[in-house]
Image (cartoon, helix red, strand yellow):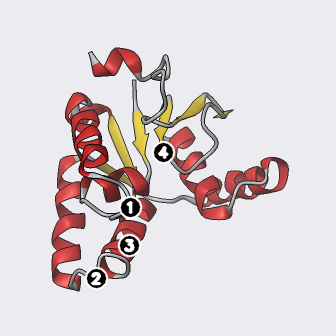
């Protein structure tokens, strides 16, 4: 199964968001450790958003943010954004009221044959073109995610 990762998941793994405790960071790292690198897809847009979060909210230097983003890119397949993904994203924003950048991540996941988009920020359990949004922090664990955590 191919899995797409959203920005907030990588941000938690980077230790961001002081409001979220160390447990969330460990849960996120454990989740990522359970996913084989061959199954994970990260949209280039997600890495751009992560860079912005690391330099903005986290106040990291651009050099440190670049290093972090490059490490994620080295660890998992990074995919680009074709025009067809934008077209699908426009449809998602129109019909399902997604914000454009979330819709773009969702459509990129679909174009890359992902079965799951792991995100805390999007509509949990929403399915589009075979991709289901899964919040990894819900209880009980989503049925698509559960087998990957064993």
Cα gap from disc 4 to disc 3, whole angstroms: 16 Å
User: Of discs 3 and 1, which sits in the foreground?
Assistant: 1
Q: Between disc 4 and disc 1, whose residue precedes?
A: 1
Q: Is residue 43 visible?
A: yes
Secondary-structure class at tag 2: loop
Numbered tag placed on residue 53 in the rendering: 3
Residue under circle 1?
19
Relative height, residue 48 to residue 5 (above, below): below
Question: Looking at this view, is 82 or 117 the one in front?
Answer: 117
Q: Quadrant of residue 61?
A: bottom left
Secondary-structure class at tag 3: helix
Q: Quadrant of residue 71?
A: bottom left
Q: Between disc 4 and disc 2, whose residue precedes?
A: 2
Q: Is residue 128 left or right of residue 145?
A: right
Q: Are marks 2 and 3 in contact (CB under 8 Å)?
A: no
Relative image position of residue 37 (x, y in whole percent): 22, 36
Q: Residues within 10 Å of mark 4 (few under 14, many from 20)?
A: many
Q: Is residue 113 visible?
A: no
């Amino acid at each position: 199964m191919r899995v797409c990762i959203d920005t907030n998941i990588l941000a938690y793994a980077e230790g961001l968001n002081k409001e979220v405790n160390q447990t969330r960071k460990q849960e996120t790292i454990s989740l990522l450790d359970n996913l084989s690198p061959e199954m994970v897809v990260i949209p280039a847009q997600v890495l751009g958003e992560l860079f912005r979060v690391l330099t903005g909210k986290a106040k990291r230097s651009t050099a440190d943010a670049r290093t972090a983003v490059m490490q994620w890119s080295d660890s998992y397949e990074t995919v680009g954004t074709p025009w067809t993904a934008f077209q699908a994203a426009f449809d998602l924003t129109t019909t399902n009221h997604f914000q454009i950048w979330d819709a773009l991540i969702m459509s990129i996941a679909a174009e890359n044959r992902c079965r799951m988009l792991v995100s805390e920020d999007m509509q949990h359990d929403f399915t589009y073109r075979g991709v289901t949004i899964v919040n990894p922090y819900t209880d009980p664990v989503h049925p698509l995610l559960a087998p990957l955590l064993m």
